[in-house]
Amino acid sequence: MTAHRHPKSLPPHGTSVVIVGAGPAGLTVGCVLRAAGIDCVVLECETRAFIESRPRAGVIEEWAVRALEERGLADTLLKRAERHSACEFRFGGEQHRFDYTEVTGCHHFVYPQPLLVTDLVREYADVRGGDIRFGARDVRVKGIDTDRPTVAYTCPDTGRRQELRCDFVAGCDGARGVSRSALPARRIRVARHDYGIGWLALLAEAPPSADCVLFGMHPDGFAGQMPRSPEVTRYYLQCAPGDDPDKWKPARVWDQLHRRLAAAGAPPLIEGTLLEKRVLDMHDYLVEPMAYGRLFLAGDAAHLVAPIAAKGMNLALHDAFLLGDALAAHFAGTGDEGLATYSRDCLRRVWDYQEFSQWLSEVYHGVSSRDAFRAGTTLARLRRLFTSPVAAAAFAEQFLGTAARY
Ligand code: FAD
């Protein structure tokens, strides 16, 4: 195609890597590439203001924070994030505090995802001079089995189609993105798991009601509290999958949170205005392999882990470190081993985290399953965490992602 014959499209421009999606995965890959002096373009369908305020994750594992720090990406996080050393399980009307830092020596960092995204956009675009194009519409990835794939998109300002020719495409456009569909169906396998459970995800304008994450296992259903900041707290309530969030009026929400998180000696929950209320259907998927030809998927584009164990953003960062480093090695001429083993190396941790989420799902939801056998085995699992140091160590290692090898 030429500009002459097709005046609505421009001739292709070239860059080394096109990154589709400016979430934690895409921005981290971009920052790593810019630090290595590699030119790249990030295409994001939303605006900068939108991605810098979209609430989601908040819990980051210490190994991920250290890996961000090594790449010069954690200065603000380390100043502002809270360090957590324990979580609390509430069941049978009692509270049981689990000090995971005592067991592993590692922390969870609580840092809302929009703050991390804000830091990464600033670092990529404003500090490292990276090219990022917001509002890119109708992104299409083509020619991934050639040496020079292209990524086409519609520019929001001109309405014209633009084409970027590149050496590699990093598909980091999340669960609802388009890059996954560019993988040939006959070359990949998609594994899925549906928990048949919904969570009402809530953000309350209220300080946390406890200094750590709370997990409430109650016959009415699971409830969770995740501190986000001194002013905002995330809560979860187990509900039916596909439930209508409008059926959850504030009085019903707070009544259920009080009931499901009640424990002798625990201070009452601090109520506040509900800023966000949506139902998440708990399901997982992953694509194997995560790469084909010149397209490499990273983060939720390749695998979704239900937020049961707060793992998705951690996995997105893990992929991004491996992909950024592997691409940097390719362009530095120091070898393609990292690209060759990228999918396998990511998926080992992904499968491990998926298995842990499935295990933890039974802990959270067994008590309310209306199945006396499942409820009994769930309580046995919970008690074991507080009676067996070996079980406690195994749980802490998985909860914090600290295994020496995956
Ligand atoms: P995303 O963050 O989804 O980023 C993808 C980007 O691509 C977005 O900016 C999107 O706008 C853009 N995009 C999409 N389609 C296109 C397109 N066609 N063209 C161009 N751009 C496109 N994880 C944790 O580790 N810890 C937690 O505590 C945690 N809590 C969570 C709580 C909730 C309520 C939810 C929903 C998720 C939670 N997660 C958590 C999961 C975490 O938010 C995700 O795993 C993480 O956002 C994945 O990052 P990503 O960069 O892969 O994808």
Image (spheres, rainbow, N blue to C red):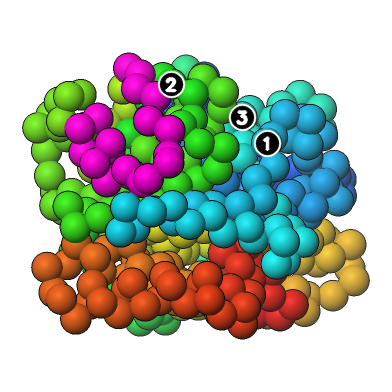
Q: Is residue 76 above or below residue 331?
A: above
262 in magenta: yes
Q: Nearer the viewer, residue 204 or 18?
A: 204
Which of pointers 1 and 2 lies earlier in the amino acid sequence?
A: 1
Residue at which label 1 appears: 82
Mark identifier at residue 111: none
Residue under the image location 63 percent in, 57 percent down: 99
What are the residue bounds of the magenta stretch? 254-273
Main SS of residues in magenta: loop
Q: Which amino acid lies under the numbered mark 3 shown in the image of this protein?
A: Leu
Q: Residue at x 23, y 72 (%)?
A: 375
The secondary element bearing badge 2 is classed as loop
What is the CA distance from the residue labelled 3 to the residue labelled 2?
A: 18 Å
- Disc 1 to disc 3, how far (Cα)? 13 Å
Q: Quadrant of residue 225?
A: top left
C-alpha distance separating marks 1 and 2: 17 Å
Q: Is residue 243 left or right of residue 58?
A: left
- Residue at image position (52%, 70%) is 386
Amino acid at dot 2? Ala
Q: Residue furthest front?
A: 265
Q: Which residue is mark 3?
A: 115
Q: Position of residue 314 (x, y in %)?
A: 59, 55
Q: Residues within 10 Å of mark 1 (few under 14, many from 20)?
A: some
Was residue 326 drawn as part of the magenta stretch in this picture? no
| Viewer-nearest of discs 1 and 3 | 1
Q: Is residue 341 visible?
A: yes
N-terminal of the two: label 1 or label 3?
1
